[in-house]
Amino acid sequence: MKITDDIIYVGVNDHDIDLFEGQYIVPNGMAYNSYVIKDEKTAVMDTVDANFAEEWLGNIDTALGGAAPDYLIVQHMEPDHSANIAKFTEKYPEAKVVANAKAFQMMSNFFRGMNLGDKKVEVKNQETLSLGKHELTFVFAPMVHWPEVMVTYDSTDKVLFSADAFGKFGALDVEEDWDCEARRYYFGIVGKYGKQAENLLKVAEGLDIQTICALHGPILKENLEHYIGQYKTWSSYGVETEGVMIAYTSVYGNTKKAAETLASALEAKGCPKVVLCDLAREDMAEAVEDAFRHGKLVLATTTYNGDIFPFMRTFIEALIERGYQNRTMGIIENGSWAITAGKVIRGLFEKSKDLTWVDTTVSIMSSMSEENEAQIEAMAEELCK
Ligand code: FEO
């Protein structure tokens, strides 16, 4: 696949993977992107996952008509992109490997005994590399998503090789909406590092970018302001969609009934969007992205071993770890003798920034009472203000 006259796609699709990064379901597979820049000197941008070494090396071979590349540029050392560095250097012993000091440090840990000798080209932030016509500038983007990450700007073709930024789940031979799987990817994988993603966006703002080539997901050529706009909202913990997410866990259906009653009350009041999510049964990464997407979140759960139900705890910890903030929150708690869920939830969010709790907490003893129904109505009223 040609991206510009000189830039060719040499990545691979993975439909065999069960869990990406050992935890994320990827129903439409995963793409590990890699690119060749053809010029007086040729460069390969990153490698791919270990399982696809032969296919990837074959793609490079085809793209270069059997010629050897001059450079391998390593932007990120996570093995989904770096696993084939040693295989590349074995096949192309004359090629130079371009990376920053942190990446080379990681390389020595991942590839014990690999000696690059004079083939090592260590670059500093904002350093440039000329391939002839193409001038590449390396911009360090620490923690988007590992500390050694750098992105690369090709000022000739106005292409930003953005590493994990702007990536998404899903192989490239499956058509699907960008936003949903890019959002799940962002909040799952990069979400903790909003500040660092914002820093990268600031750098990007100063560049004339016509194409974004990420390490996962499609090559972005049109409507770039949409993708950059989404990243601005996500990295600043902004509200993307007005509405209420009700995340619940329920053992015997009573808490679920309360969650559904609240959903109906919100809908009756014209709430722009209501999302109900059973945390025990839905994909946790999907639940996390929905919580960051919407402006309001109600947590409905049972008291369990003096704490809260395990799936709710996992969910809340995932939010806190990613810096959940700037939201309106409500609690529906349930218990059959000592109700402690609400107290535990508030305690967990104690250090979170800019959370506004609605005045009403719905406190259920086993099953909804008339008083609880009135509380739910009052909570819906507050959430629709
Ligand atoms: Fe796609 Fe952070 O690796």
Image (cartoon, rainbow, N blue to C red):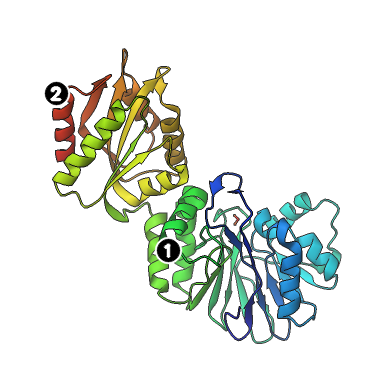
Q: Position of residue 40 (x, y in %)?
A: 73, 86
Categorize mark 2 by other alpha carbons within 10 Å: few (<14), some (14-19), many (20+).
few
Residue 164 falls left or right of residue 329: right
Q: Position of residue 367 (x, y in %)?
A: 25, 21
Q: Label 2 near label 1: C-beta < 8 Å?
A: no
Q: Which mark is residue 370?
A: 2
Q: Position of residue 91 (x, y in %)?
A: 84, 69
Total numbered labels: 2
Residue 146 falls left or right of residue 381: right
Q: The N terminus lies in which quarter of the figure? A: bottom right
* Above/below status of 164 relative to 41: above
Q: Earlier in the sequence, mark 1 or mark 2?
A: 1
- Residues 215 and 153: in front is 215
* Above/below status of 288 relative to 159: above
**Looking at the image, can residue 337 be seen?**
yes
- Secondary structure at numbered mark 1: loop
The quadrant of the rendered image in which ligand 1 is seen is bottom right
Amino acid, disc 1 = Asp
User: Which residue in the protein does label 1 denote?
Assistant: 177
